[in-house]
Amino acid sequence: MKQLVAYLTTAFPDKNFTIDATLALKEAGVDKIELGIPFSDPVADGPVIEKANLIALQNGFKLNDLFEVSEKIGDKIDTYWMGYFNNFYHKGYDFMVSQAKKSNIKGFIIPDLPFEEIAPYENKHPLISFVAPTDNKKRIQKILKNAQEFIYMVAYAGITGSEKKEDLKETIANIRESSNTPLFIGFGVNEKTAKEKAQGVDGVIVGSAFIKVLLENDTYSNKINKISEIARNIKSEINS
């Protein structure tokens, strides 16, 4: 069965919501959670996730919020920290690793840490490998030499949340030839696109489709119900 990975901005709108939403998404069929670490310049993210990041920071987000949420969910669903390297560097990478291990965090997703610079970090805690359609076969082989947990394939060159399309058959074939690690696709995955995007991969990563709901002026419970319904629909689509 193909897997569904859900992204949530940590502590948006607050810590308890993130915990409750995670557990609800698990019940709705989500297999893994990306806890986004709010950051002021999320360069890989589109305007939807960027807005959630900024609101969380304006509301006073601290890394301790991430740790507290992780303690509540890390033993209930496979959980990954998604954040920009500044957060890890500023706090101390070894400290972040130790905190992650306390909460059973499976790995880190750091989109602005280039493959060429991961050597000092890759053996301390699993780092998710990124592959883009612009990567040739030789580079893909290098990137995936030590791939762990899953491979994050970017569906197109750009930012999250848009619905650009690229022919990924060759990229997928090169990835499959280079690694047996599960392959998930992210960027632009929603209820409309999930079935098509899931072709040839082991799962999809969904972020903006959930965060759009959380930005709506609606009740706490309605938001959780809506994202749960989205998750059920996507899980059904990718496995039909």
Image (cartoon, rainbow, N blue to C red):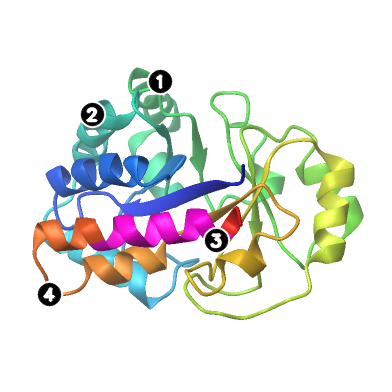
**Residue 139: percent from the left, percent from the top?**
84, 52
What residue type is disc 4 on?
Answer: Asn
What residue type is disc 1 on?
Answer: Lys
Residue 217: image tag: 4
Among numbered discs 1 and 3, the one appearing first in the sequence:
1
Q: Of discs 1 and 4, which sits in the foreground? A: 4
- Disc 4 is placed on an element classified as loop
Q: Of discs 2 and 1, which sits in the foreground? A: 2
- In this view, 7 is above or below 187: above
* Quarter containing the C terminus: bottom right
What residue type is disc 2 on?
Answer: Lys
Q: Residue at x 83, y 65 (%)?
A: 169
Query: Which region of the structure is painted magenta?
Result: 226-237
Crowding at label 1, few (<14), some or many (≥20) Cα neighbours within 10 Å? few
Q: Residue furthest front?
A: 240
Among numbered discs 4 and 2, the one appearing first in the sequence:
2
Crowding at label 4, few (<14), some or many (≥20) Cα neighbours within 10 Å? few
Residue at image mark 2: 72
Residue 41 seen in the current view: no
What residue type is disc 3 on?
Answer: Glu
Residue in the foreground of this view, choosing between 240 and 41:
240
Alpha-carbon span between mark 4 and mark 3: 28 Å
- In this view, 38 is above or below 20: below
Residue at image mark 3: 237
Alpha-carbon span between mark 1 and mark 3: 34 Å
Residue 72 vs residue 179: left or right?
left
Residue 180 seen in the current view: yes
Residue at image mark 1: 101
Q: Of discs 1 and 3, which sits in the foreground? A: 3
Tell me whether the residue at label 1 lies in contact with that at label 3, contact meaning CB atoms closer than 8 angstroms.
no
- Disc 2 is placed on an element classified as helix
Q: Residue at x 55, y 79 (%)?
A: 163
